[in-house]
Image (cartoon, helix red, strand yellow):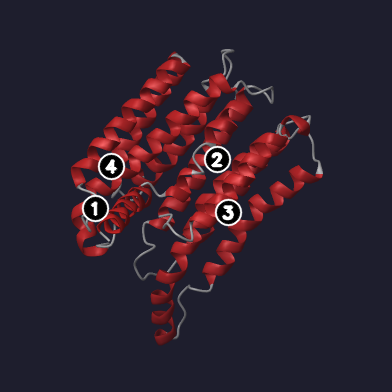
Amino acid sequence: MAGEGAFQRQRGRVFAWLELFRLPNVLTVPAEPLAGYWLAAQAGMIDWVLLAPVVGAAVCFYIAGLTWNDYFDRHTDRHDHPQRPLPSRRIVPYQALVSGWLLAALGLYLCYRAGPASLAIGLCLIGAIYCYDRYLKALPVIGVLNMGACRGLSLLLGASAVPVMQPFHGAVGLAALMVMVYISAVTQLARRESMPHNPGFEIWAPGIGLFLGLLFFAPRVQLWDPVTVTVWILALGFPLLFGMRMQGFTVSANLPKTLQKREAIVTELPKWIGWLIAHTLLLSLLFITSTTPDMTLAHPVVIGLVACWGLNRLLSLFFAPS
């Protein structure tokens, strides 16, 4: 019985760390550096020896940011989210802080191994992550743009691993900007996911941002084959579906019904935030399939990203994505 109790406690600690790391979201992180590398290499063959360090660095930076986020929010979470790992004392706060710095150091080392350009972008990325968690998160506009910039820099980090010194051509910069705008819009939505409110224009921001970005990206499409067309339809259709669903929670002249909607959105919006974050995998898939003249080169990447999406959705049943 004592051994079984020890096993249960150990499993609980592991689960707490995975909860702290937002495990479903971690599966979305490799997509941006992979897409950035692919765009910079102009759909050439992937050299995993060059790509693996920056993908590993992006994952380390992302998890470090999550640990810092919960560490700096630990006092407010005692009242708003007492079930989270730090306020519930399932993880000691200083352990989260130290683990964040260790992961940041590991990520910078991997960037150093990848080359000077990767190290420079890695320093910008980890600096942006720390500034968001420590100082800028609560600021209305700067905070959400800061978060979007983190994912945009992650895409540039992948592009920096391409050895030929032309990684930052137009397609890479445009893709990074699109990711930044999209994640900024999703971050704005997530800021109020746990409080009753009336959703406004922000419910349409992810879809509008993607639509405008893809208007500029469309001339770069190499081949409009069935796979590419399907990915474009899904990439644009899902944010539209989200906006239509959330439109049902807007206020009306009927005060009692309005109050009911303001309360109901607290249970509905967090589920959609997870789907919107997972949508970044599809967005990276769009960048890759749209710029690949020979789709046989992209088949392993497409399969990998689709598998990550499936695992993300499965793990979201057990771990909160936001």
Q: Which residue is mark 4?
A: 68
Q: Would residue 216 be seen by someone viewing this image from the given angle?
A: no
Q: Nearer the viewer, mark 1 or mark 4?
A: 1
Q: Which residue is mark 2?
A: 178
Label 1, secondary structure: give it.
loop
At x 33%, y 32%, the residue is 103
Sequence-wise, the earlier of marks 2 and 4 is: 4
Q: Amino acid at mark 3?
A: Gly
**Alpha carbon distance from label 2 to label 1:** 34 Å
Q: Residues within 10 Å of mark 4 (few under 14, many from 20)?
A: many
Residue at the disc numbered 3: 207
Marks 4 and 3 in Cβ contact (< 8 Å): no
Q: Nearer the viewer, residue 247 or 41?
A: 41
| Disc nearer the start of the sequence (3/1) | 1
- Between label 4 and label 3, give the one nearer the viewer: 4
Q: Secondary structure at mark 2?
A: helix
Instruction: Determine the CA span between mark 2 and mark 4.
Output: 26 Å
Mark pair 4, 3: CA separation = 30 Å
Cβ–Cβ under 8 Å for marks 2 and 4: no
Q: Which mark is residue 128?
A: none
**Which residue was labeled with disc 1?**
86
Q: Nearer the viewer, mark 3 or mark 1?
A: 1
